[in-house]
Amino acid sequence: MVNDEDSRPRCTPALPATAALTGDGPPDAALARSAHEVGPIVADETATIAALPPHEQAQLASIDRQDRFSAPQADAWRRSAENPAYAAFARRALEAAADRTDAIQTGRIPYHPDKAFTDREVITLGKALRVALIRDEPWLPTLFDRLLPGVSLAPTPKARTLPSQALLYEVVRAAQDFPTPELATALRTARRTVRHAGVPRQLDKSLKKIDAALAERTEVALRLPRLDFDDEGVLRRTAGDYEAVVRVTDTATLTWEKAGRPLSGTPAPVRRDHPTLLKELREVVKRVNAQLATLLRALEGGFTTDAAHPYTWWHTELASHPLARTLIRRLIWEVETTPGKWHATLPETEGTLPSPPSDASVRLWHPLRSTPQEVRGWRNLLTEQHIRQPFKQAFREIYVLTPAEEQTAVYSHRFAAHLVHYRRMFALFRARGWRSSLLGPWDCGDGDEAVRTFAAGQWRARFFHTWADWSGDDELASTDHVRFDRRHAGTWQEAPLRDVPELVFSEAMRDVDLFVGVTSIAADPDWTDAGPERTYWERTGFADLTASAEIRREALSRIIPRLKIANRCRLEDRFLLVQGDLRTYRIHLGSANILMTPNDDYLCIVPARNQKPPTGGGTGPFLPFEDDRLSLILSKAFLLAADTKITDESILRQIKRGI
């Protein structure tokens, strides 16, 4: 929810458009009264609805809103967007709003801060915008270029007020509900130019939510602008004797050259003489990186929709796009060579893109649809050729129903009864697109369910958890079961686990495994609290491996033979065994906790605060995917293999205590 910065008292909202016609007097009088009281835009809506048959009026009543913060169900918005008359009104209303802000900017209408639109007009324009966004109307980008500056910038130079802060935030709320790349870009532009002190901070928060929501709307999220980059993903700009180079690989980076020679930083003359260009280029880098992050989230989100794309579009708009090409070519794709027959390909290793029939379909490969032999083949190839994918694909964890889940039928206890660092888990909820209320020691703060929708909104998963207690300054939570619901006739109905599509179940449980694995106190090496928490820590810190830990084990089986300490390491069940000169160590592949032979003494090694273990860059070992826990395990293995060279006294005392 976006909080309006404007705290002035508001007038009582007018009745919904459908209700405006039900009072005393003839309809024409009601329309005239509506226009006088709430403005011509609302009057147009009222007239539009009045001309519709009763059943269509009833359908549109489902999106009536008494205030800017109420939120009708997405299905209600989609049904309303299918009404041609209301869709036509939506365009008229939004263009009328842009005409009004144009008139304010040119002085044809006197400027009064935050008075450009009435409260009811803001609500109605929010409805119109959501309908247009659902329909993905082609005229919207041009309208954004007029409307967003019009509501966010005062016509008087240096004035820090806005013509309509209320409408700006209503546009933001609409963008969170039904985002498009073009609206996200327009809001970023508004954020750079607005002069009100508090608005940029609010927009920064909202844009993070919009990017996350856009990633879930895969049908539009894959649209990327070219932004004047050449076919190789490079943008060049001249600044006096210097040339700026923005290059896109995994991310966009800005470097500088002089006479073709790369420079180590931004030249002082550029900072002094070309500040506007420098700011513009840095904004381009931020924008491209945000779009690439959204693209990757959208591609991952497409797993559960089994999204397939026309090959010609995929080739032009993704595989050959200057911003996306390096990411797309390191992912495994399946091309439908004949109906029902899919051929997997990794463009990065084949040099050229495949050449199937022009009407072929393309989709992302998923290990759940492949045989174990095929999965092993792709993992071997990535490791041998040192190809790191933009997100876990070949090494992606898969989750299938267990006998215990077949017994419970409608819920899974696979990740229940864990103690986790709550605030860390809450942050992961938001990062992975799950919605949950913040818990804590207050009324109704004891428990909630984290919810995420899958398969284009047709399925959702619910992960239950409760606030547990304080541990010093830290908050703990306890995890509970996972349930799944299916959308039917506009409502959610709980579904048996056996009915959940395999990809939906696997991807949802993968997220829950991530939440628990990353935030469990069992992975905290210096946990010292006693009581039930310590019992849980001792039991879970060396427990059987989860699916994510099993993937870690498989990656290590490929990595270890290539290490210089390979003769001192071997995998044994849940552990990586490391032979030091002083003792032998067992590093748990789930928690990275360490036991020392012969008595299984616990060895506490705490990574330095804010120090991130190496992930394969530079001279470190190549890791086929980014995994902090995998990097930590390898860091500990290198340290312990040379235990006679350890200088940290706190570690040495623990090692020598059992000798």
Image: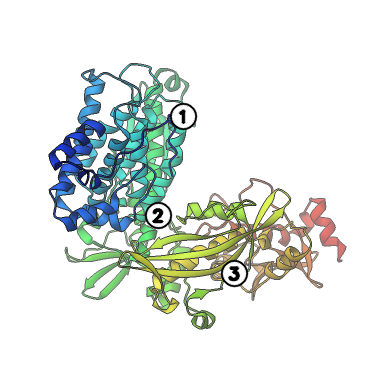
Rounded to the nearest angstrom, the CA distance separating label 3 from label 2 is 27 Å
In the rendered view of the protein, which quadrant contains the N terminus?
A: top left
- Depth-wise, is mark 3 or mark 2 nearer the camera? 3
Asked which quadrant contains residue 445, the reply is bottom right
The residue where tag 3 is placed is 416
**Who comes first in sequence, dot 3 or dot 2?**
2
The residue where tag 1 is placed is 198
Depth check: give the residue in front, 217 or 15. 15
Residue 293 visible somewhere in the drawing: no
Image spot of residue 331 (x, y percent): 37, 60
The answer to whether mark 3 and mark 2 are in CB contact below 8 A is: no
Residue 106 visible somewhere in the drawing: yes
**Is disc 3 placed on a helix, strand or loop?**
loop
Crowd around label 3: few <14 · some 14–19 · many ≥20 (10 Å): some
Rounded to the nearest angstrom, the CA distance separating label 1 from label 3 is 42 Å
Image spot of residue 579 (x, y percent): 73, 67
Taking the image as shown, residue 510 lies to the left or right of residue 420, namely left
Tell me: residue 221, above or below residue 286. Answer: below
| Residue 566 tag number | none
**Who comes first in sequence, dot 1 or dot 3?**
1
- Depth-wise, is mark 2 or mark 1 nearer the camera? 1
What's the residue type where badge 1 is placed? Gly
Asked which quadrant contains residue 652, the reply is bottom right
Depth check: give the residue in front, 66 or 590. 66
Image spot of residue 284 (x, y percent): 37, 35
The residue where tag 2 is placed is 297
